[in-house]
Image: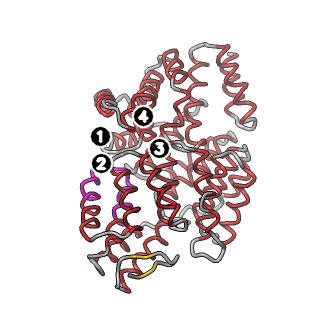
Amino acid sequence: MRQDVRGYPVDTESDAAITAFDTCIARFFEFRADAAEYADAAIAADPDCAMAQLLKGYLLMGAQSRKMLTVIQAHMDAAAAKGLDRRGQGWLAGLKALHGNDLAAASTAFYAHLAEWPVDLFILKQMQQQSLFWRGRSLDLRDSMLRVSHAWTEDLEGYGHYQGMLAFGYEEAGDYAAAERHGRASVARNPDDIWGIHSVAHVLEMQGRHAEGIQWINYPLDAWADRAPLARHIWWHRALFHWDSGDYEGALDLFDNAVYPGDSAAYIDIQNATALLWRLEMTGVDVGDRWEVMAGQAETILDDQLLAFTDTHIAAALNRTGRGEAVARHRQTLAERADGDGWGAKLTQDATLPLADAVQAYFNGDYARACDGFLGCMEDWSRVGGSHAQRDLYAQALIDSAVKAGRKPLAQALLAERGAQHAASKGVPYWRAQMAA
């Protein structure tokens, strides 16, 4: 039995396996495209290493693809067949819950595991980024990091990554000063810490500090070429700063060259592209035919992907481009997922389907029904996951629907709220002008 870089047991006696195991996690935290290769190397060096099998399973789970579930199950079976120590049992419990699309159960498993293994950095990330983030558990994103803070010291390997996660948790919980402090500290420790950069970008977005945001993400376009798709998400944040500032050409230029430069079907790329194009169109910008390629890629994953948040963006892309057959198939898929009483079925019933229906009404030009739909599920928006900045798209769509439906009192109320919270955004005066026209 060897130990990893933080002193926790890994069931191998192979030097090559433990080196590859540690390297995989380090590359994973840097969002390197080759991280999975090191998990494969650990398995090749020691096929009996259960932790290496589980590590590969978690990496595959991150793709949020139903097509991967059989392969992930095989890795779980291989790990279980080897026999698992207590740490391995905790890893398996969390992965089983993710595999079964029960994110609440995954959080429970991760909390129990981290009480015993508080500096198990990889599982800490799985809890924050998978089971909590995709349930919209904003306060828990912070509290889960604080719960293990007693065990983290600056000399521990990976402390900067912990600090970046803590920063993101503080931001989603609304403590922007603490978030910015920890985020900037993580980047000062490692200027290449892309998650720390991301966490500070969230703070600047939520505080309307758009010019600072543009300067914060001031890198060459190829700065993170081997770290897609998160790199493209960082550029999405910069594009939002341009959009909020009224620099629509700047936002479109980033869309073409950094946010969605190809024909990706990765779920986060579909989210980013949809959210940026819809925002631009809601403020009167002609985006040309940019929806078409992306919507075609969205259609390829409508039966495959696992995230409710992605489903709402797929619905937008398909409806916006008039893909009626695909829209009907997607809605049928959601209806089938809603048939049951498990965690995922309940989420689909309460939030995903109502949001998808509101999106469909919006792009069909039935703004009154869209307005009612967005309002009707507003308290459940957070349950589909994503960050405050990402879910802000729904609030913007509600405002735009109210304005276009001629519901002036509601539009005035929503714009009063938005003006107070996003005073620097150019969207507010645009919608007010549209309402007055």
- Nearer to the camera, 105 or 354: 105
Q: Amino acid at mark 3?
A: Gln
Q: Find numbered disc 3 in the image and state the secondary structure of the residue it sits on.
A: helix
Horizontally, is 322 left or right of 6 in the view?
left
- Front: mark 4 or 2: 4
Closest to the camera, between mark 1 and mark 3, is 1
Q: Which mark is residue 66?
A: 2
Q: Name the residue that disc number 1 marks.
A: 303
Disc 1, SS:
loop
Which residue is under mark 3? 271
Label 1: few (<14), some or many (≥20) within 10 Å?
A: some
Magenta residues? 55-73
Circles 3 and 2, Cβ within 8 Å, touching? The answer is no
Residue at figure coordinates x 64%, y 65% from the top left: 150
Which tag, 4 or 3, sits closer to the chain's start?
Answer: 3
Callout 2, which amino acid?
Arg
- Tell me how far mark 2 sits from mark 1, CA to CA: 8 Å
The residue that label 4 is drawn on is 347
**Magenta stretch holds residue 72:** yes
Q: CA distance from mark 3 to mark 2?
A: 18 Å
Q: Nearer the viewer, residue 256 or 3?
A: 3
Q: CA distance from mark 4 to mark 2?
A: 18 Å
- 193, above or below 387, in the image: below
Circle nearer the viewer, 2 or 1: 2
- Amino acid type, residue under disc 1 in the picture: Asp
Tags 4 and 1 touching, CB below 8 Å: no
Specify whether residue 367 is painted magenta: no
